[in-house]
Image: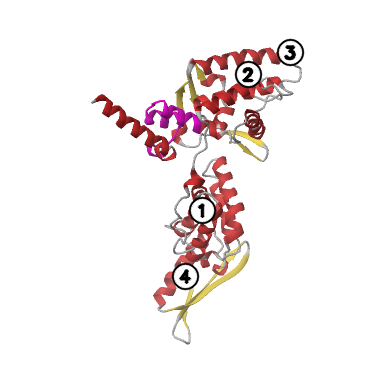
Amino acid sequence: MASIKQQDNGKWRYRIRYKDNGKFREVSKSGFRTKRDAQSAANDIESKINTGISVKNENLIVSEYLEMWVKLKEKHVKKSTLAKIKRAITLHISPKFSFYKLSEIKRVDCIAWVNEMCDHLAVDSAKSYCATFTNALEDAVNDFKLIDINPMKGIKYPRSDKRKNDIHFFEKTDLQKLIEVSAKYTGTKPFVNYQYYVLTMLLARTGLRLGEALCLKWSDLDHNKLTIDKTLYRENNKDYITEPKTQSSYRTILIDKKTLSLLKSFRIRKNEYSLKSQSYAMNKEFIFNDSNGNFLKQCNYRTYFTKICKVSGLNHLSPHALRHSHAVHLLESGSNIKFVSERLGHSTINMTANVYLHISRKMETDSIDRYENFL
């Protein structure tokens, strides 16, 4: 029960004694104009104590709060989401706010931090990292009643630098060259590189995310249809299968005849190689696997992809550029944007249109030209 008393200067203060881990602690605050104000503030503190959160004289620092917040999040989010939260905290939030008192974070500090982030990161990347801190502070306001307002809420971001946010993709002729080089490249491990070639073709002609492709099962392939209902996630040097990125990422897409034929040939060659090689353990369930029967490592494929780009004489892009390339080429060929959006697993058509804005504008111009020619 809180003790409310009036001080000599006419102001009011509260004092609360409570037990924390077997030890008695005390929290107090003075300077309230009325007894009612002091009682109201004391009630909030007692509510926090009852939820199991240590108020420690309201000197709770950000690092302590985030540690508690992450533990609570572990029960409610996917492993991949939790990894992103921890990454944002470790790389961006803690270096700035770790030793701030939670109750003393000023909006001006948050604005300065956001602007600083946007100086060396693309605005969209900065937004994703800042969102973690915004959500954590919002929970501190609404769920735990630790602070009265969220200083991160509603902060305006600098205008996006289009050069930073331009998508990277291969033009049609460059992609054809890349695929040709990939098909011929054997290196010192011919079958390993052949498998990477099949993976490259699949990514380029379906727009799958790399994590989605690496955990595909043969059972996901039904005639010319491919079902995507999982993705590969890596933590602490271990691979896990988890849910797709978003609800819209659950999808079934059509595969073109050339890609389907390649997958069938690859399955036969994979079986033959497993019979000939004593050092190769084939995983019959999954389409792709390494010599130990485990998932292919994304880092190894990225190394291969860098090599192929170099041998092809092309700019070094990440494997994700194959996804962008597939979308761009579909749109350029006249595919409906709704079809492209669903094929990629985007949440909305607007998202697809915004990402591939320059292509969308080209489609508008082509549509007007066709309309004029029609009339």
> Are dots 1 and 4 in contact, CB under 8 Å?
no
Whole-angstrom CA distance, mark 3 to mark 1, is 52 Å
The reply to whether the magenta stretch includes residue 22 is no
The residues tagged by marks 1 and 2 sit, at their Cα atoms, a distance apart of 43 Å
Comparing 331 with 23, the one in front is 331
Q: How far apart are the alpha carbons under marks 2 and 3?
A: 16 Å
Closer to the eye: label 1 or 4 = 1
Left or right, residue 290 beside residue 363: right
Q: Is residue 149 above or below residue 27?
A: above
Q: Residue furthest right?
A: 278
Q: Which residue range is magenta in the image?
A: 324-351
45 vs 281, left or right, is left
Mark toward the start of the polypeptide (4 vs 2): 4
Mark nearer the N terminus (1 vs 4): 4
Question: Which amino acid is tagged 1?
Answer: Cys
Could you say whether the residue bearing mark 2 is in a helix, strand or loop? loop
Whether residue 281 is visible here, answered yes or no, is no
Q: Say which residue label 3 marks.
A: 276
Q: Which residue is mark 2?
A: 284
The secondary structure type at the circle numbered 3 is helix
Near mark 2 (Cα within 10 A), the count class, few <14, some 14-19 or many ≥20, is some
Q: Can you give x and y, in whole percent of width and height, for residue 353 in the image?
A: 39, 37
Q: Which numbered disc, 1 or 2, marks the residue that appears first in the sequence?
A: 1
Q: Amino acid at mark 2?
A: Lys
Q: Residue furthest bottom?
A: 8
**Colouring of the image:** secondary structure
Residue 193 rendering spot, x and y as whole percentages? 67, 23
Residue 130: mark in rendering = 1
